[in-house]
Image (tube, rainbow, N blue to C red):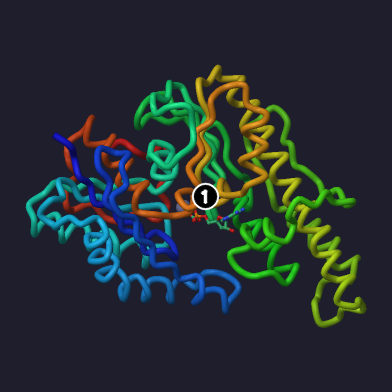
Amino acid sequence: MSTVILGIETSCDDTGVSIVVDGHLIKSNVIASQTSIHNQHGGIVPELASRQHIRDIMPVIDLSLKESEMDITDIDIISATYGPGLAGSLITGLNAAKTISMCLSKPFYGVNHLEGHVYSAWLDQATGPDKQIGFPIVALIASGGHTDLVLMKDHGIYELLGHTLDDAAGECFDKAARILGLGFPGGPEIQKTAGEHLSDFHLPRAWLPGTSNFSFSGLKTAVLKLAIDQNVYPEDSSKLDKKSRDNLIIEISAAFQESVVDVLSSKVIKAASDHRAKGIIIGGGVAANLPLRERINQLSPIPTYIPVPRLCTDNGAMIAAAAYYQQLRQEPWDLKLDINPGLKIYDIVH
Ligand code: KG4
Ligand code: ZN
């Protein structure tokens, strides 16, 4: 008998609803993106995000059911993200899930968003030699709000190896893109702008030797300084013609991306070796970055499991996948579960 799980994700600026069978087979995965709303402001405006989730949640649930060609009564388990994230955003998805669970009398599972990013590696559309991922696994979760390196010892058991001491990697991509006058979110913009270019500039790397921690605030400051020195920032004070300015933006984007890729990939590979990991997972929006994916694949002597780019960014399928493995080992959650905006990766067991 297969288990059909509805996964709802509304922790930030995407309303994601997916139907996943047995933790890996995606029947539908609908995402209403708010990028065009937040783009105008150069970053996420929490108030606008929460209002848009309220508008989108019901149509996205309906569309996800329609695309799966299933009826709501076919769903066995309802799951939703309860943290970390923006309070006003989390509450919409969590309440929708609890309401559906109550109306259908079907079990409800609350999912840690960060654990969801890890479990996107179990979805069929993740690359990797097979789905029998052996433990322990080193997982890098690099998103707009987090950069965590964890040792996953078994399903649902995590040890935090390191985290960012200041900005998250995705946040740094977003800020660098803003300095360079590129769009939001910054990660895909920087990747597109940098292309395959090898930059003549060298930006700093915070290695923080002897630890698995990260720091990106120095890199952000270095990008700003370089952009000012090269007359790229502020944009309207530029003494440059368009072609020279565009070339410099490519140079700085490539140098920036190379610095982030170098640090993230080196630290993941080192941690995997130190902890004798049997596999490496990368997840979160920054894991969509093609040079990062290629570098980790090149450097890793052990199997890597990397979701396709659209499953690295926020989606409901990863929440359903995490809920599937949760329900194999624990009872459903009480419907009194509240949002937890500051939830950590190791705060999993209830
Ligand atoms: O996981 P995610 O969708 O949302 C959060 O949980 O934060 O991650 C969003 C972050 C943004 O900062 C975005 O700029 C970054 O992921 N991102 C990328 C790429 N695609 C998204 N960063 C680098 N390269 C990409 N291709
Ligand atoms: Zn995320």
**Residue ranking furthest to the bottom:** 236
| In this rendering, position of residue 29 left or right of residue 225 | left
Mark 1 crowd level (few <14, some 14–19, many ≥20, 10 Å Cα): some
Dividing the image into 4 quarters, which one contains the N terminus?
top left
Relative to 189, residue 49 above or below:
below
Q: Position of residue 34 (x, y in %)?
A: 45, 71
Q: Position of residue 178 (x, y in %)?
A: 69, 68
| In this rendering, position of residue 155 left or right of residue 102 | right
Please tell me in which quadrant of the rendered image residue 132 appears: top left
Task: Identify the residue at horizontal 51%, vertical 25% (top origin).
Answer: 279
Task: Identify the residue at horizontal 42%, vertical 63% (top origin).
Answer: 14
Residue beneath disc 1? 309
**Residue ranking furthest to the top:** 276
Please tell me in which quadrant of the rendered image residue 30 appears: bottom left
Identify which amino acid the numbered label 1 is placed on: Pro
Relative to 218, residue 228 above or below:
below
Task: Identify the residue at horizontal 37%, vertical 74% (top origin).
Answer: 52
Relative to 248, residue 42 above or below:
below
Task: Identify the residue at horizontal 22%, vertical 36% (top origin).
Answer: 327
- Element at badge 1? helix
Q: Position of residue 283 (x, y in %)?
A: 50, 43
Q: Position of residue 113 (x, y in %)?
A: 39, 49
In front of the other: 7 or 28: 28
Dividing the image into 4 quarters, which one contains the C terminus?
top left
